[in-house]
Amino acid sequence: MPPTRTTRQNGWAIRGVRAARGLSGYRLAKRLGIQPSTLTNIEREVKNVSTTLLGRIAAELETPIEAFDRESRPMRASTDGDEATAAAAEPDSLDGEEEA
């Protein structure tokens, strides 16, 4: 079997779009057929995502896949003000939502 191609994404961007759509992490994970913990790890950038899954996430969120491009990561000044550092919002849990 050929290796799975993966990409580094902006997990904060996935979470931001998901939240803007009013979709809990639990619900998005279920729609994608993945474990909620997998989505949490993707959003926290603990786990790289396959390009296939990233495409499915983008489709489910009705967002161009380019919106999750790592190169578009926002910048902020560091606490000492000497350099810009990448800023990513720390995603919280999957909103604690459970479905019956």
Image (tube, rainbow, N blue to C red):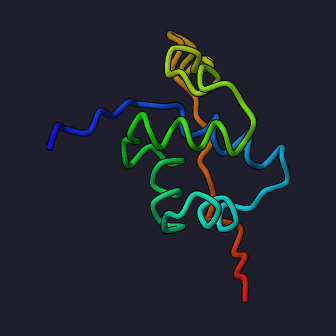
Vertical placement of 52 versus 73: above or below?
below
- x, y (%) of residue 9? 48, 31
Vertical placement of 80 versus 17: above or below?
above
Q: Quadrant of residue 32?
A: bottom right
Instruction: Give whichever of 63, 74 is nearer the camera.
Output: 63
Instruction: Give whichever of 60, 46 is nearer the camera.
Output: 60
Q: Residue at x 49, y 63 (%)?
A: 34
- x, y (%) of residue 33? 53, 64
Q: Residue at x 64, y 23 (%)?
A: 67
Instruction: Give whichever of 32, 89 is nearer the camera.
Output: 32
Is residue 78 found left or right of 13 in the rendered image? left
Q: Residue at x 26, y 39 (%)?
A: 4
Question: Number of numbered discs present?
Answer: 0
Q: Quadrant of the N terminus?
A: top left
Q: Quadrant of residue 87?
A: top right
Vertical placement of 24 versus 1: above or below?
below
